[in-house]
Amino acid sequence: MTATVTPLAETDLPEATRIFRVAFGTFLGAPDPETFWADRDYMRGRWQAPHVAALGVHRDGQFVGSNFATRWGSVGFFGPITVRPDLQEGGIAQALLSRTMEQFEAWGTTHTGLFTFAQSAKHIGLYRKFGFYPRFLTAIMTRAAVDHAPNGWSRFSLLSDADQAAALAGCREVADSIYPGLDLTEEIRSAHAQDLGDTMLVEGPKGIAAFAVCHYGPKSEAGADTCFIKFGAVRDTATAGADYQRLLDACESLSVAVGMPTVLAGTNLARQEAYEALAARGYRTAIQGVNMHRNNEPGYCRPGVYAIDDWR
Ligand SMILES: CC(C)(COP(=O)(O)OP(=O)(O)OC[C@H]1O[C@@H](n2cnc3c(N)ncnc32)[C@H](O)[C@@H]1OP(=O)(O)O)[C@@H](O)C(=O)NCCC(=O)NCCS
């Protein structure tokens, strides 16, 4: 009856995906859990990414759940974690989480967290056992995409190899300016290599002023008609507020260019200016949850930080 956690095998991906749909669909009360979020894929892209540890769990010879730990340099987060609904409340998630914590230890991440359902005593209680503490809400917001006049931005996928290498170094500097060691270069590379989306680069006097890794379409985490800003950050300078607006212009224009009518962007409400700027642009909350951080540390969820991510 012991749950055994191992790296997630490719052969288990279809069942992991089925359990993911049924687990979330059941929890959220979807009429047909088997087809919940069928227009998007949270599993394969992460499974193939070198900066993600994909974990599977077996019990009595059956595959029963999975979890994904993502490393963004010094920052780590996990999810989606899912357990087959008929086997929940039996300690299987805790087996997955013990192994996930070992992964963060091995990576040496200095800031670790997750996004979860704020209203669920079970979720908050489960993650608190592993040292995570609930902090600010995260709002995952949408608005209709609109095109904007070009204003010093470019698409990573259209650059030469040499310019891509320089852009990756610039993005590393931008991320590091909001949290030491935060590094999205593998996320940028993975989105490009797997054709999940593109990264928008906004120019400034010091090189890249802001960037955003965007997913779009059914193969990605975004969904069939959506451009999802998986991660966006603005270099910490005096012009950060204006650069953030240009970054959002760039992402909305990308959305139009690739035929996605909706833009999806989430941010933690501790980043007050970043959240309020989204609301002022007409973004409305579609999903709301809470961030839990290990040791109750703020990380880069603090006023003055212009960043977009939701750690799903
Ligand atoms: C969330 C999920 C992964 C948990 O899996 P699970 O295997 O049922 O979890 P476990 O049995 O290992 O742990 C449950 C723990 O929750 C905690 N818990 C449950 N109810 C609680 C409550 N009312 N108050 C406080 N803590 C509570 C307890 O610590 C409990 O473990 P314990 O009784 O041994 O102390 C599973 O329910 C799931 O797949 N849900 C749907 C998808 C989802 O919500 N994923 C997570 C999104 S962040």
Image (spheres, rainbow, N blue to C red):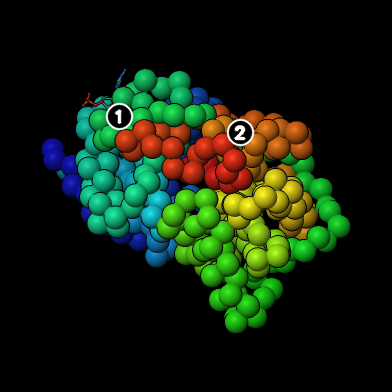
Of pointers 1 and 2, the one earlier in the residue sequence = 1
* Image position, residue 120 (x, y; %): 41, 22
| 1 vs 2, front mark | 2
Q: Is residue 312 found left or right of 8 in the rendered image?
A: right
What residue is at 22 percent from the left and 43 percent from the top? Answer: 98
Residue 93 falls in which quadrant of the image?
top left
Front-most of 49 and 84? 49
Question: Which quadrant holds the N terminus?
Answer: top left
**Label 2 CB sits under 8 Å from any ligand 1 atom:** no
Figure label count: 2
Q: Is residue 201 found left or right of 71 in the rendered image?
A: right
Note whether residue 44 is visible: no
Residue labelled with disc 2: 272
Note whether residue 153 is visible: yes
**Amino acid type at mark 2:** Gln
Front-most of 39 and 216? 216
